[in-house]
Amino acid sequence: MIVDARSVPENEMIETDVCIVGAGVAGIILAREFIGQKFQVCLLESGDLMPDTATQSLYEGKNTGHPYYPLDTARARYFGGSSNYWDIDIGNNNLGVRLRPLEQIDFEERAWIPYSGWPFGKAHLEPFYKRAQSICQIEPCAYDTEVWEESGKTARLPLTGDRVQTVIFKFGSQDLFIREFRNAITRRADNLLTFLYANVIEVETTETAQQVTRLRVACLQGNTFWVSAKFFILATGGIETPRLLLLSNRIQEAGLGNQHDLVGRFFMEHLHFWSGIYVPSDAHILQSMSLYNRIHIVHEVPIIGKLALTEKVLRHEKLLNQNIQLIPRVLSHAELYPSIVSKATHSLQILRSAIHNGAMPDNWEGHFKNVAANIDHVFMNVLRKFKRKASGSFNKPLINAFRLANMAEQVPNPNSRVSLVAECDQLGQRRVQLHWQLSSTDILSVIRTQQIIDQELRRAHLGRLYIHLKDETPPDDLHGGYHHMGTTRMHIAPQKGVVNEHCRVHGMANLFIAGPSVFPTGGYANPTLTIVALAVRLADHLKHLMA
């Protein structure tokens, strides 16, 4: 049943057993798992069933770190949450999202990655991954490439070593979340009430802040009311969840769950960017690469193949996880050798411009040091330009090749964070500030990954990879994938995480968090399947507590 929160009387108290805040992917799965239970469930959604400009504007905020999307465009504040932004055409007039579990190594504490390690391994999550794939209708569960190969249609690259592998991504349907699951929750569940236009603005607790007593809910039209429950789950994403905890500071001045200044820290994204070109050795290879550049229906499931390093190589080389999709392009020879973007060449450009204009720039000494320390990059650019002119390469025939669409994990960084600013939204709540930070390891790991892939392509006589990244300078087009992870990270110790292994906020008896904000690390897989698996796991835990 749907209730318009704007119709709830002022200061009304809604009583229920379990209260879920947020009807995004995690909230929807939790609500679905609770259908038909003997306890009552309340689902609070800030928006409507369709987008609403006034409600969406509550997401406005400030970016101060690496360039990022405007925050009010990076999330969807209406029923369905991020699933409303899935935009991959998977056929039959349906849009979808890539789905794949995290790898075993992603759950481990890796000595070369600070702050890595989940409270459990992948084997523990496997039964929930299996259920998640059934929910998302992408069975069979296997991801072994052999299961998804079809002769003449989806053959993989015949790499000869054990360093680079083909990995399979499946696609899930948007329609499941925004129609089928929504209808099951709002029309066919007698024990579920869904409130729309319901903005949670405060989590109220006992005087010791060890138990949540009720939530304060406000509508943009002016009325406010309360929701009390035995258990509360925040499922509002990797930016809004820490914001709500920080705003709820009536008892704990630093915010709920923030005794160790961890709430909002460790914001992670998947690094998305175009960099590198794969040129096959002959036309036959070029024509047999469809597994990697378009969606195929195998066993009635949409799939695509990508390249990744094997676990053995990740351990030996001490690298972050990454996957690469190959996108066919017709390119010129000049595009194989773009100018090297580095601190040295950037500083040289600034100095040349300053000399031309007759005035030295600020920090001119630093620019001279950059050029001197990386003079080899400067000479390399000059040499490449000379070779192009001398050989007339700009006039050579075009090349059939593949551009590399990179998607990489990043190192958890406590200084990459979500915090609050003084400016308030229409409900009088302080807005959020995102300071997304990258590290040199993030980019250098990508470079080494591409070097290894190039070596294996050459070894198998499949062609070569032209690598454009040369130092830790991020490529100009580096952006995120709307994957907001890590800001209420999971760890068994309260000094190292906001929630414990059951996704319960440390020090609080009845407050849980669902969604990607609990991820300690991000791996290279889209987070959606892991979000679903963790939501199913949390639902089972709460059913047990309610029994």
Image (cartoon, grey):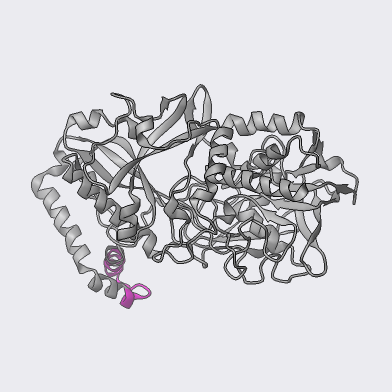
Residue found farthest to the left: 390
Residue at horizontal 66 percent and vertical 68 percent from the top: 258
Seen in the picture, residue 148 relative to 259 is either above or below; the reply is: above
Task: Name the foreground residue: 298 vs 545.
Answer: 545
Residue found farthest to the bottom: 365
Q: In the rendered picture of this protein, how many numbered marks are placed on residues?
A: 0
Q: Is residue 380 magenta?
A: no
Q: Is residue 246 visible?
A: yes
Task: Give the x, y percent position of residue 393.
Answer: 14, 43
Task: Give the x, y percent position of residue 15.
Answer: 86, 48
- Among the 4 quarters of the image, the one containing residue 80: top right
Task: Name the foreground residue: 539 vs 184.
Answer: 539
| Magenta segment, prevailing SS (helix, strand or loop) | helix
Task: Name the foreground residue: 86 vs 497.
Answer: 497
Residue found farthest to the top: 92
Q: Name the side, left or right, on which 48 lies relative to 401.
A: right
Task: Give the x, y percent position of residue 286.
Answer: 23, 31
Task: Give the x, y percent position of residue 547.
Answer: 77, 46
Q: Name the side, left or right, on which 158 lies relative to 238.
A: left
Q: Is residue 427 visible?
A: no
- Among the 4 quarters of the image, the one containing residue 173: top right
Quadrant of the image containing the N terminus = top right
Residue at horizontal 78 percent and vertical 67 percent from the top: 250
Seen in the picture, residue 417 relative to 339 is either above or below; the reply is: below
Image: magenta residue range: 348-366
Residue at horizontal 71 percent and vertical 30 percent from the top: 184
Q: Name the side, left or right, on which 113 lies relative to 348.
A: right
Task: Name the foreground residue: 307 vs 465.
Answer: 307
